[in-house]
Structures are given as structure tokens and as C-alpha cells.
Amino acid sequence: MSKSLKKKNHWTNKVHEAVLSRNKEGELGFELKGGAENGNFPYFGEVRQGKVALQSGKLAQDELLLEVNDTPVAGLTTRDVLAVIKHCKDPFRLKCVKQGGVVDKDLRHYLNLRFQKGSVDHELQQIIRDNLYLRTVPCTTRQPKEGEVPGVDYNFVSVDRFMELEKSGALLESGTYEDPWETHWSC
């Protein structure tokens, strides 16, 4: 496939903007699904025709939500995305894209792909990672140090539990650290 054809078919060429306001009842008129808590990009569930107060553009079920008023939301939980929307004054802008090609709702799949540094895809991966780490609590197999709070500083888990998490693919990343006395696994 030629470079120009690849650029023409790139998902960024399918990104579109929708401008909307809350309806008369103060509702958005769409269901937000996915979110980082489910390992997904935020995406639209049911879009209730007649309930969405669109001023321009369109919203479609299963489309990915990338930005709210220029704030990147990929990698945020649905709760955090809704909080971003809640703080927007009407009307507000949503940047959306139809799933397909390298961008589908699965964050893990997208984060596992390799892209050239500085490319749009590489930058989006970085945004996702930054947003994920806002809510991520790392886990470790080591014992807590003085002053560390379980669930805040780290999730302290057994080696067996860590291996289960790693095998199931539940960890964003993992590695080992060896000190002179023992080996620790961290995520």
C-alpha cells in the first residue's frame, strides 16, 4: 500500500466534531460506555435521538470519544469523562471517531502497537498512559515500608496473586527488581 493511501486511510482523517448542549431536562441524551476501568476508550452506547441537543455534527453508537473541549479523555474512567463534561458550559465540543483499523475500543490492543515516535498514534498512546496513571495504583510483592498506605501508595500482593494478574493480562506493565535478599515483582 502506498504511503499516500495509508495516510488517506488513517483514522485521524475520520475524526469529526460534534457540538452539543444538555437538553431541556439537563441530560446529555447519550450513554457513555467503556472507560479505562474496563480497559476501553470511552465510547458512546445508546444515542437517544430526539434527546441529544446537537448544534452541529453527529453522534453515533459505538464511536470512540477522544476529546471534550480540547481535553483528551482517552485513558480516563467513564466517571472522570463525565466529570470533564459536567464542568463544561453549554455548548461543548466532542471529538469522536468511528472504531476501525488500529483504533477500536480496546486500550490494551492499541497500547501494545508500536508507532514511530512523534506520530499522532504515538502521541495518543502517551496521552492514554498519562491519563491511566492518574488513577493507577501500582502493585508490588514486597512488604510495605513505614508510612506507606495500602491501596494508596501500592497494592501489596502475594507472588502467587501477582503471577495470576500477570498471566490474565490485567497488568498495564510489569517487571522484576532484585535486591541482595530477594526478588520483587512490580506493576
Image (tube, grey):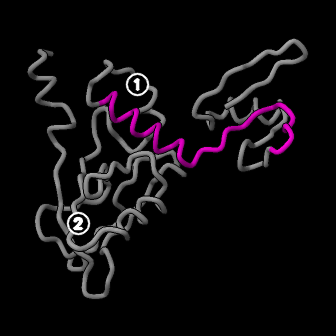
Query: Residue 42 or 68: which is nearer the viewer?
Result: 68
Task: Determine the residue positioned at 75% across, 43% down.
Answer: 155
**In this rendering, position of residue 154 left or right of residue 79:** right
State whether residue 166 is above or below residue 82.
above
Q: Quadrant of residue 146?
A: top right
Say which residue appears at 48% left-offset and 35% top-offset.
Answer: 108
* Residue 179 occupies quadrant: top right
| Residue identified by numbered label 2 | 92
Which quarter of the rendered picture does the N terminus lie within? top left
Residue positioned most to the bottom: 25
Magenta stretch contains residue 161:
no
Residue 117 in the image: x percent, y percent?
33, 19
Image spot of residue 176 (x, y percent): 72, 19
Q: Nearer the viewer, mark 2 or mark 1?
A: 2
What amino acid is found at the position of numbered circle 1 in the picture?
Answer: Leu
First along the sequence among labels 2 and 1: 2
Magenta region: which residues? 121-147
* Secondary structure category for the residue under label 1: loop
Image-based side of 167 in relation to 105, left or right? right
Tag count in the figure?
A: 2
Residue 2, image x, y percentages: 11, 15
Q: Amino acid at mark 2?
A: Phe
Mark 2 secondary-structure assignment: strand
**Quadrant placement of the C terminus:** top right
- Residue under label 1, please give it: 113
The CA distance from mark 2 to mark 1 is 32 Å
Pick the front one: 62 or 156: 156
